[in-house]
Image (cartoon, helix red, strand yellow):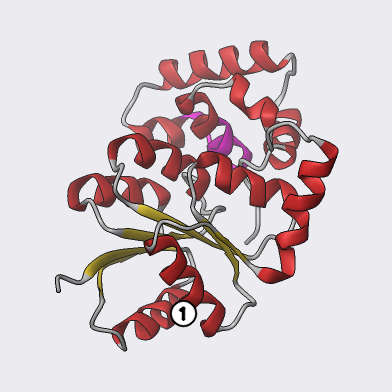
Amino acid sequence: MTPVTVLLADEQALLREGVASLLAGSPRYEVIGSIADGRECVRRALRCQPGLIVFDCAMRGLSGLEAIRRIVPRCPQTRLLCLSAYEDSRWVRAAFDAGAQGYVLKRDGFEVLREAIESVMRSRYFISPDIAHLLVDGLRRHDGPAFAQGMLLSTREREITQLFAEGLSARDIAERLHVSIKTVGTHREHIMAKLGINGIAKLTRYALREGLTTLEP
């Protein structure tokens, strides 16, 4: 039987290595990539079309959530499992809204992770047992979409908002995205106008509130 190809995307190398070691014990899976950057995750996924991506929702540069929003429509057969440190209901719901089939906490043991992988590969949904009540509570309250205001912005605008919030200058962003500084400035103006705010400090608070970045070291 052809093994399921797996792409691992998380800023923490130790965590990626641990998951890779877990999967190496089974002939059913083949890890084809281990990366720390959301943008590279998108590139690798589109090129390799892996059977499974295990990702962190809060990577710097391009968040995991934004990465899978780009991957889902172009990799329809790829299963997506979020491995996250965040137990807040907004992160959980945002991951599923973006296209994930599973959400596991980093503090869960390998047995939970193994069960989650098996579930999503059988086209089932999985959520860490410790936080399942969050989704149930949300359904009872009839909550709207997680981080709903972020949907006011385009994909590029969300990416630029994240980079500004993480302390990059317009020049840094232009170099990273291979666009002109003027283009970055135009995007910033549009973002501020859409959100009705001014100044990078307010933009950073918005990015934190809407889950576009965590500003963790």
Which residue in the structure is indicated by mark 1?
Answer: 14
Residue 52, quarter of picture: bottom left
Instruction: Rate crowding at label 1 as few (under 14), some (14 to 19) or many (20 or more) other CA atoms within 10 Å.
Output: few
SS assignment for the magenta stretch, majority: helix
Q: Residue at x 36, y 85 (%)?
A: 21
178 in relation to 41, above or below: above
Of 210 and 174, nearer the camera is 210
Pick the front one: 180 or 191: 191
Horizontal and vertical percent for residue 97? 57, 40
Asked whether, in this view, residue 156 is left or right of residue 203, the answer is left
Instruction: Answer left or right for 74 relative to 198.
Output: left
Residue range in magenta is 161-170
Residue furthest out toward the left:
1
The amino acid at mark 1 is Leu
Q: Is residue 203 above or below residue 187?
A: below
Q: What residue lies at 52% left-to-right and 24% top-to-bottom?
A: 157
Query: Which element type, helix, strand or loop, lies under badge 1?
Result: helix
Question: Residue 201 is drawn in which quadrant?
Answer: top right
Q: Position of residue 94 (x, y in %)?
A: 62, 43
Image quadrant where one finds the C terminus: bottom right
- Residue 214 in view, yes or no: no
Q: Whole-percent x and y of residue 6? A: 30, 65
Front position in the image: 26 or 10: 26
